[in-house]
Amino acid sequence: MCGIVGIVDAGGVSFQLYYALYALQHRGQESAGLSTFDGKTLYKHKGQGLVAEVFDEEILCSLKGSVGVGHVRYPTTGAKIPENVQPFNFRYAGRHLAIIHNGNLVNTPALRQEYEQRGQIFCTTTDTEVIANIIADELRVSNSMEDAVLLCMRRLQGSYSVVIMLNDTLYAFRDPMGIKPLCIGKTEQGYVVASESVAVDALGGTFVRDIRPGELVTLNESGFSSTQIAVASHTAHCIFEYVYFARADSVMDGILVYDVRQSIGQKLYESDRLKPDIVCPVPDSGTAYAAGYAVRSGCPFLEGLMKNRYMGRTFIMPTQRQREQAVRIKLNPIRGNLKDRKVVLVDDSIVRGTTSRRIVEMIREAGADEVHVRVGSPPIIAPCYLGVDMPTRTELIASGKEEEAVRDSIAATSLTYISLEDLVEAIGIDASNLCTGCLTGHYPVEIPGEKSCRRAVTYVDGTYQSNLKRFGTEQETS
Ligand code: AMP
């Protein structure tokens, strides 16, 4: 999972890219990077760590130009090594190219092998570099970005929201199923494309629209044009974006994430109408859910846990022991709110169960009488191959276990998950247009050894090569 942003703005882009990456920091904390272009030179800076750790004012002032791209990384493929930090920058046939990607390909090894056999060399271990190679290869032949993206959409299997800076033009595209998000906004003197609308908000910009699945958008300072490269029979928007990954204040594929989470909270109450003394969120991911539960049940919303905001997500701790330790540093009970109370504790999801087990224990130690856990997603039973860093089946607490066994394992008084039907209803997108792989074990792409519910994709092709573009000079606008 990663956060991506591209900006073209006459007023300069490095500080705007930095602010946008700050707004997208929740999508990746392992590394951050920016590339900009000033008409002659490609400037770049990237490193491992948080946005605030990687950049300072001097660095941002040195990144000149009115077009650029930025990336925050949460590694799903490729090792955590400096070479894998994006953007990837290439000097190629007299052009400057920088690429950023959010998503995960499932056919990387085969593609990489094919390109290596053709003499291509690779500097990283990521799927993103494979995309860059396909693009560069096709540009060499046709000089048409439409053709290059068409070739990508024909060859890449998996999820990909991609932004490419080619000299002073930005190109943004989304896989035909729109698995990962990508949207367009208007800035004061240009345009922005970003993983989530909160990045547009951070720039004081105006949200324009989501990039459509299978669409290529070409942007410069005066406007953008659109080419529909491919159309899938159904989309496969990642359901986990709505449950956990996206910020609650983002609008994604036309839906405010906060509304979805609040509605899930309401449905959680309706499923068994339990009336607690307090409705307590697991901060911050459970807040919107708990708000919905409290509103619908009429029971008071009261915080029982305080979060240390200066700690990263527990998930990025590599060992189980470190994860357990991290939960304790991250969350502390507010004892006065919990003592002798019947508590409904609401969280977005249970993955390994480490967080819930520790939190239930904490709340009991603080004197609560009963701890009823309510979860905003159905049991996570299968891994994600499409860009969310989920553990293997053996590490997933709900995989192969009955609900009662999970309840027992986290020592809750009761445990209820939202049903898939209720979750889908809260999102408001038909289940056939969502990727529910982690909840059902059925994936929208073919994955060896897994069940798939593949979508048919139609390519709107054959028209581009006759319509050659000279990159960096001619632009269509709309
Ligand atoms: P655990 O059950 O201890 O593995 O952690 C579950 C909590 O981690 C959830 O309540 C989420 O807030 C958060 N979480 C869920 N999925 C992820 C993920 N893929 N990466 C990071 N954090 C996650």
Image (cartoon, helix red, strand yellow):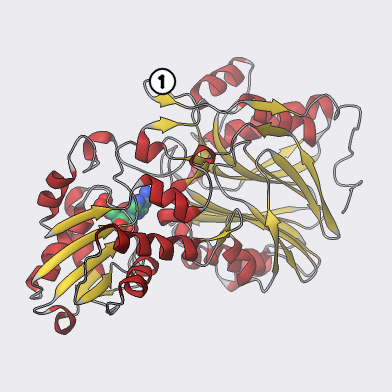
The front one of 360 and 128 is 360
Looking at the image, residue 40 sits to the left or right of residue 368; the answer is: right
Quadrant assignment, res 193: bottom right
Q: Which residue is drawn at the image coordinates 31% and 61% (left, top)?
A: 270
Q: How many marks?
A: 1
Q: Is mark 1 within 8 Å of ligand 1?
A: no
Q: Which residue is drawn at the image coordinates 38% and 44% (left, top)?
A: 389
Instruction: Where is residue 167? Give x, y as percent.
Output: 79, 48
- State which quarter of the image contains the C terminus: bottom right
Looking at the image, residue 257 sits to the left or right of residue 153; the answer is: left
Q: Is residue 411 above or below residue 343?
A: above
Looking at the image, residue 430 sits to the left or right of residue 358; the answer is: right
Instruction: Where is residue 419? Give x, y as percent.
Output: 33, 48
As drawn, which residue projects farthest toward the bottom?
336
Q: Which residue is drawn at the image coordinates 50% and 42% (left, top)?
A: 434
Looking at the image, residue 265 sits to the left or right of residue 211; the answer is: left
Instruction: Give the residue at mark 1.
Output: 448
Instruction: Where is residue 199? Give x, y as percent.
Output: 60, 64
Judged from the image, the secondary structure of the residue bearing numbered disc 1 is loop
Instruction: Where is residue 146? Give x, y as percent.
Output: 79, 34
As drawn, which residue projects farthest toward the top?
117
The front one of 167 and 59 is 167
Type of the residue with mark 1: Pro
From where the camera sits, is residue 226 visible? Answer: yes
Disc 1 residue crowd, few under 14, some 14–19, many 20+, Cα 10 Å:
few
From where the camera sits, is residue 317 visible? Answer: no
